[in-house]
Image (spheres, rainbow, N blue to C red):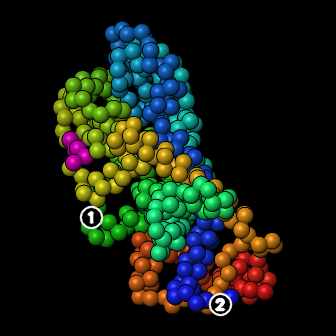
């Protein structure tokens, strides 16, 4: 095949990387888009699931100690972990207790202290979807796989933008909207390219704001902050998936930044004094109240609002009900605030319903991008071959390109490591095997 147009070799090389990145990412894109879109609607789904516990008879509440005691009786051998304030009259209190390495959520009627339902925290529907999305239900190995796919999804999107970029084309057809009258091949090509341009920036935002949770990148980010002196205490988002013993101390989000707290039984009346202090403060719900880690210690009151900029944390003296410390979101380090805004946007909670709709549209466009790309590949692939773009003579890699790849490898170390592995495998193994022709690494 002769190459006359300037830049064709480079264009072909980018196309090959786009193809292989897509082959790795498409199954994960479909999976993550589906589970992520579902998780975006967590408030509405949980409200619907919990509706039997939101319409209780309104009556004077019994003591919080009595409610906690009822939850402990319902789970033999348990110890109290958190008490969640009922967000409104007529709604059940949530008491989270731990036993045998597992946390259990008990719905308790505040008026009678009757336990209405108990369920393991990790078995709740939205927690299952959370783990399906973040670690494929297999813990940290799944987190590594998701992170690897996310890193290569960045490559897929960036190379796709390069391939899409209009070169000498006039008009917006096929650029910002698909051409519908040019036959099936042109339709699928335009559908893939146009959906890609509309979704790319949003998808890149979703990928980057999801990285703090990932086991490898989150740990890397944490170490960088320690080295640079920008760490500001424990983070309030989980990194990877903690072991079972630590999970028994955690709720939907990490308490005290993920530190496991071995709570003690509090003196009678202390919880009610803390509640009396906290209720008038109008802290963003859900409000979680955790007993001291040791006798005589302070109670911790945390807003677990999905819209993280509304969060605050207090310590309260259970003996007097006095607020000892308070730290609002605005007082955290700017890096923590930036990550908090990103996570809230990632979960669809930063600006309400509009955020949920935007995230859902992004997920649907990602599905459309993956499906249309798969159709294009299937229709164009040669019989008996994978269908990768054929290799041309080696392109000239400029300083800008090398710098961009190095920068991306530093920002995403998991990508950098996997890129080295792929290049070494392609260079020294796959090209020399009979499999190389099927992969498109060499001609017949």
Prevailing secondary structure class for the magenta stretch in the rendered image: strand
Magenta stretch bounds:
326-330
Evaluate if marks 1 and 2 touch, with contact meaning CB atoms under 8 Å apart.
Answer: no
Q: Is residue 420 visible?
A: no
Q: Is mark 2 on a helix, strand or loop?
A: loop
Nearest to viewer (mark 1 / mark 2): 2
Residue 327 percent across, percent down from the top left: 22, 44
Q: Position of residue 124 (x, y in %)?
A: 55, 35
User: In the figure, 385 relative to 204: above or below?
Assistant: below
Question: In which quadrant will I find the N terminus?
Answer: bottom right
Check disc 2: other Cα within 10 Å, few if <14, some if 14-19, many if 20+. Answer: few
Was residue 328 drawn as part of the magenta stretch in this picture? yes
Query: In terms of sequence position, does the residue under pointer 1 or pointer 2 come before the other?
Result: 2
Residue behind mark 1: 230
Q: Is mark 1 on a helix, strand or loop?
A: loop
Quarter of the image with the C terminus is bottom right
In this view, 120 is above or below 275: below
In the rendering, at what x and y percent does residue 303 appear? 32, 37
x 20%, y 41%: residue = 326
Check residue 2 in the rendering and tell me which mark sits there, or answer none.
2
């Amino acid at each position: 095949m002769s190459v006359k147009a300037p830049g064709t070799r480079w264009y072909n090389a980018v196309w090959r990387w786009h193809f292989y990145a897509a082959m790795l990412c498409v199954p994960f894109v479909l999976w993550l888009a589906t589970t992520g879109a579902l998780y975006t609607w967590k408030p509405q789904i949980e409200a619907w699931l919990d509706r039997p516990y939101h319409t209780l008879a309104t009556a004077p509440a019994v003591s919080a100690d009595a409610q906690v005691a009822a939850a402990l009786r319902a789970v033999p051998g348990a110890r109290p972990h958190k008490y969640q304030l009922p967000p409104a009259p007529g709604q059940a209190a949530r008491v989270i207790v731990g036993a045998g390495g597992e946390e259990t959520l008990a719905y308790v009627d505040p008026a009678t202290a009757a336990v209405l339902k108990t369920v393991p925290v990790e078995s709740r529907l939205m927690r299952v979807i959370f783990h399906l999305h973040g670690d494929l239900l297999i813990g940290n190995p799944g987190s590594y796989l998701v992170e690897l796919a996310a890193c290569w999804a960045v490559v897929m999107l960036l190379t796709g933008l390069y391939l899409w970029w209009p070169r000498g084309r006039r008009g917006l057809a096929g650029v910002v909207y698909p051409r519908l009258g040019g036959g099936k091949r042109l339709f699928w090509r335009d559908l893939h390219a146009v959906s890609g341009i509309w979704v790319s920036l949003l998808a890149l935002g979703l990928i980057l704001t999801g990285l703090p949770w990932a086991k490898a990148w989150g740990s890397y980010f944490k170490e960088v902050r320690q080295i640079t002196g920008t760490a500001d205490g424990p983070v309030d988002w989980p990194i990877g998936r903690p072991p079972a013993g630590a999970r028994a101390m955690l709720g939907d989000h990490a308490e005290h930044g993920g530190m496991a707290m071995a709570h003690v039984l509090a003196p009678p009346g202390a919880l009610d004094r803390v509640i009396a202090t906290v209720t008038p403060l109008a802290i963003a719900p859900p409000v979680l109240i955790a007993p001291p880690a040791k006798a005589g210690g302070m109670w911790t009151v945390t807003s677990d609002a999905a819209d993280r900029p509304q969060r605050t944390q207090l310590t309260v003296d259970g003996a007097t009900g006095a607020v000892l410390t308070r730290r609002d979101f605005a007082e955290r380090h700017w890096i923590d605030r930036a990550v908090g805004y990103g996570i809230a946007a990632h979960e669809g909670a930063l600006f309400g319903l509009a955020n949920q709709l935007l995230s859902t549209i992004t997920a649907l466009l990602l599905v459309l991008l993956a499906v249309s790309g798969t159709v294009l590949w299937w229709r164009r692939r040669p019989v008996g071959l994978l269908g990768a773009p054929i290799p041309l003579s080696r392109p000239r890699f400029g300083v800008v390109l090398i710098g961009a790849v190095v920068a991306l490898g530093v920002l995403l170390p998991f990508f950098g490591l996997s890129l080295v592995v792929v290049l070494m495998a392609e260079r020294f193994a796959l090209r020399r095997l009979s499999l190389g022709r099927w992969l498109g690494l060499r001609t017949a």
